[in-house]
Image (cartoon, helix red, strand yellow):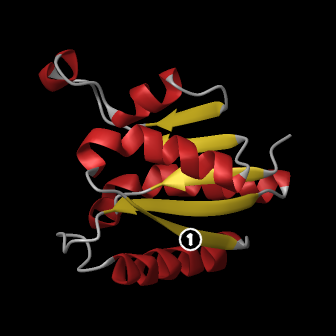
Amino acid sequence: MFKSIMIPVDISHVDTLRRALDVGSDLGKHYGAGVTVVGVTTAAPAASAHSPEELEQKLEALAKDLSGAHGIEARAKTVVSHDPTIDMEDKLVDAAKDLGADLVVMASHKPGLLEHIISAHAVDFAAHTDMSVFIVR
């Protein structure tokens, strides 16, 4: 059913993404699909990594952990953006297309007041793509 699963991650919040990582990995194992964790960063130093190369190393370590824990072959992809706050959804849609992803598993949180002003990344992503999106809380 699915051949390529993308799991967008914010590496500085991996603890809150655990369910999405587990769901995406389990689906990958069940369907024999490739699983890729994707992180978006800037070229400038950020809280999660000082460079895109450092983020790539962290994502590769996460992919290795998922591979071992779930018996899958997970990969990592780093996407560089001038301003991830503004173009996060566009960068994720482009990454999913580049990977040939037919399922995107994303973490979300319970909507609050802020979502009435600025929508959540998962909601925006699902609204602007024709691929299947599994949003995990």
Name the side, left or right, on which 78 lies relative to 30: left
Outermost front residue: 82
Q: Quadrant of residue 68?
A: bottom right
Residue 118 horizontal side relative to residue 39, left or right: left
Q: Nearer the viewer, residue 108 or 42?
A: 42
Res. 107 visible in picture: no
Q: Is residue 131 visible?
A: yes
Quadrant location, the N terminus: top right
Residue for point 54% across, 53% down: 7
Report the number of numbered marks. Answer: 1
Q: Position of residue 21 (x, y in %)?
A: 52, 57
Report which quarter residue 123 is drawn in.
Answer: top left
The residue positioned farthest toward the left in the image shown: 113
Q: Residue furthest top?
A: 116
Give the x, y percent position of residue 126.
51, 27
Q: Which residue is mark 1?
A: 76
Q: Quadrant of residue 51?
A: bottom left
Q: In the rendering, at what x and y percent does residue 69 appear?
A: 61, 74
Question: Which of these two is toward me, 80 or 120?
Answer: 80
Picture quarter with the C terminus: top left
Question: Residue 9 in the image: x percent, y percent?
Answer: 42, 57
Q: Residues within 10 Å of mark 1 (few under 14, many from 20)?
A: many
Side of 15 where 22 appears, left or right: right
Please determine whether, in this image, residue 40 is positioned above or below residue 120: below
Q: What residue sits 60% from the left and 43% below the top?
A: 104
**Disc 1, SS:** strand
* Residue 78 in the image: above or below residue 120: below
Q: Residue at x 73, y 70 (%)?
A: 72
Q: Amino acid at mark 1?
A: Ala
